[in-house]
């Protein structure tokens, strides 16, 4: 890890000397900063399963490091024996969260290294796997830094910025997506005043975004979701940055529940609303936000949260969608690692993918 | 109480036979329905002080009943002796919440009865005081029913209605203000589908509005504040009803924090946004919302609420305004006991007061 870290700890890193995957245990935030040094495969599996490491990019990076550490321990005389043991280790980690796309994506990428290097020695294979898992993280950092650079070009030192949920370093290897411009600006000595919506029901804003921003020395203020309008009315917000879970071809951006409301408020108060995400979250096969199915989550998240006492009467209904989407007309720009897309998005997003393709041809 | 109750319990009532003030202990909602029969003055004082009875109109009614019960026990041979004892009882109750306007308003009104009836016997005075405290409650019920009638004229059976915080029966003697159209409609066999914003940080929507609506058999769904946009986008809301803490002469309506956000969302989705409140909350001496000072409350309400664990990191800032105001341009109508005011409010609110004055002359 040649990168100097922006906080005093990283989300996920490799300690090759100690043969350990090092993670910040996110299930204990914000009460406790627990750095875990995981050397056993079952502990790495558990870390992914128990969301001690979370966020699609961060999970991919952890899996890459994890399967490399398994490979490093393999005692094998032949390629076939090595691959057999590698494959078992890979499948074991892959079972930790079966639906997490980045998990299997990273593990398949690691397997590919073994598959295309049948002529190499076991020692050479281990070396190549080390290179690959480091590359996975480096690329993630690159992607986030690109988003950060593009985002930073849209704001100025001293801006008030509002964010919703956590699309930060804690979900990636470094910088994050929505929070990348803030962290990157911070590296350059800039200061922003950031308002984090607490983000009910699970409070990722209060627990995670506030934690990482505060740890990075950012002037951070937690507000309840329903206070965003007043904060904007006060003139304290010059830009809104949010992440995204999926973006449709027309630019409709699906993200944590509450995002569409923030977008409408921003439009009302004349504040730019920026959606940040890697091109991997833009789904050109989906025409519009209405075509994205929104996950409904358990009522208890709303009525009980971390209490043992109920916060709402027994018997009432609860509506608890995990996501909503901001209509493309509410979005000032979509910021990706290949540039800034502006309306009309049906055109500009295609242009982003053309740039990506060109870049990959190089 | 000749009124048939809309729930199986009342917010505040008088049991003259048992010489008791009967209240629903709101500090235990929604976990427990505790009906308290208060016969001792110190218990009545405590009920007001500890917010076991809350909401400006309900406090006024409780104080009227409370001081009547004190008067009822008075042993006195002369008017002077009676008044002296009455005055002491009145001042004692008045000290429970020194800044609650309705508390001293109701107690002064009761005292006035004694003051203007120096020629009456002690028995007659007690009888007159009984009449007065019942009248205070009856007028409160009348005011709420009027608001309910006017509100009901704006909606139809089957409507989806969204509300924020609690401006319901639990804050008044009956019906409430924002929830009056729903309860009144219910008495007439109508059914609405009501969404209650949970209303962070203190969750009055989840705890109180959901409780009283559910108890009245209303189809009630609790949502987190940040879900209102999605509920509106789904087409589930045909009208928004909120209460108000103070309305400026231009119609800007100050109410629980989050109200302005809901108003902006309603406008975006083309949904009428109605503010309900008695004329006593309209302050014609205040020109506009910006002139209303907004109370800032303790950070712990946001970061700890009823947890013992912190929900946000130590050291981060917290912004916790108790109220915001909806710009008059966002408000479809303001519903009072003297009719419905529509834009431009600088004119229509004056008209409401003209009607009130005429009515009082009768």
Image (cartoon, coloured by chain):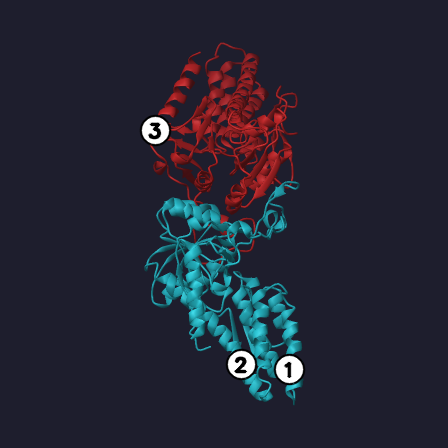
Chain colours: A red, B cyan
Mark 3 lies on a secondary structure that is loop
Front residue of this view, candidates A47 and B354: B354
Q: CA distance from mark 3 to mark 2?
A: 73 Å
Q: Dots 3 and 2: beta carbons under 8 Å?
A: no
**Vertical side of B220 occupied by A7: above or below:** above
Instruction: List the residue tagged with mark 2.
Output: B130
Q: Is residue B332 left or right of residue B40?
A: left
Instruction: List the residue tagged with mark 3.
Output: A285
Q: Compare marks 2 and 1 and give the one earlier in the sequence.
A: 1
Q: CA distance from mark 2 to mark 1?
A: 15 Å
Which dot, 2 or 1, sits closer to the camera? 1
Provide the chain ID for the residue under circle 1. Answer: B
Provide the chain ID for the residue under circle 2. Answer: B
Quadrant for the C terminus of chain B, please: bottom left
Query: Circle 1: is it few (<14), some (14-19), or many (20+) Cα within 10 Å?
Result: many
Q: Residue A6: where, in percent of width, then height?
A: 62, 27
Query: Circle 3: is it few (<14), some (14-19), or many (20+) Cα within 10 Å?
Result: few
């Amino acid at each position: 890890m040649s990168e100097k870290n922006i906080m005093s700890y990283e989300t996920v890193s490799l300690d090759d000397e100690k043969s350990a995957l090092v993670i910040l245990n996110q299930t204990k935030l914000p009460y406790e900063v627990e750095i875990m040094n995981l050397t056993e495969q079952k502990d790495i599996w558990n870390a992914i399963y128990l969301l001690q490491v979370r966020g699609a990019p961060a999970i991919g990076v952890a899996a890459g490091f994890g399967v490399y550490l398994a490979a490093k321990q393999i005692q094998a005389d032949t390629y076939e024996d090595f691959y057999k043991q590698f494959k078992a280790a890979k499948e074991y980690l892959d079972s930790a969260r079966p639906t997490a796309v980045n998990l299997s994506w990273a593990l398949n990428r690691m397997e590919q290294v073994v598959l295309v290097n049948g002529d190499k020695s076991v020692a050479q294979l281990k070396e190549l796997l080390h290179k690959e898992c480091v590359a996975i993280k480096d690329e993630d950092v690159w992607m986030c830094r690109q988003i950060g650079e593009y985002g930073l070009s849209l704001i100025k030192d001293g801006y008030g910025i509002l964010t919703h949920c956590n699309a930060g370093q804690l979900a990636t290897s470094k910088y994050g997506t929505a929070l990348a411009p803030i962290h990157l600006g911070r590296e350059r000595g800039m200061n922003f005043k950031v308002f984090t919506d607490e983000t009910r029901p699970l409070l990722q804003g209060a627990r995670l975004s506030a934690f990482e921003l505060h740890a990075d020395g950012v002037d951070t203020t937690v507000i309840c979701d329903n206070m965003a309008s007043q904060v904007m009315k006060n003139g304290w917000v010059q830009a809104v940055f949010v992440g995204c879970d999926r973006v449709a071809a027309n630019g409709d951006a699906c993200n944590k529940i509450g995002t569409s409301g923030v977008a409408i408020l921003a439009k009302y108060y004349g504040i730019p609303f920026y959606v940040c995400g890697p091109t991997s979250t833009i789904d050109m096969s989906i025409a519009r936000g209405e075509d994205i199915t929104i996950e409904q989550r358990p009522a208890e998240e709303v009525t009980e949260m971390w209490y043992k006492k109920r916060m709402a009467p027994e018997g009432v209904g609860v509506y608890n969608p995990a996501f909503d989407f901001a209509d493309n007309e509410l979005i000032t720009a979509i910021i990706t690692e290949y540039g800034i897309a502006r309306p009309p998005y049906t055109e500009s997003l295609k242009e982003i993918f053309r740039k990506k393709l060109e870049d990959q041809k190089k």
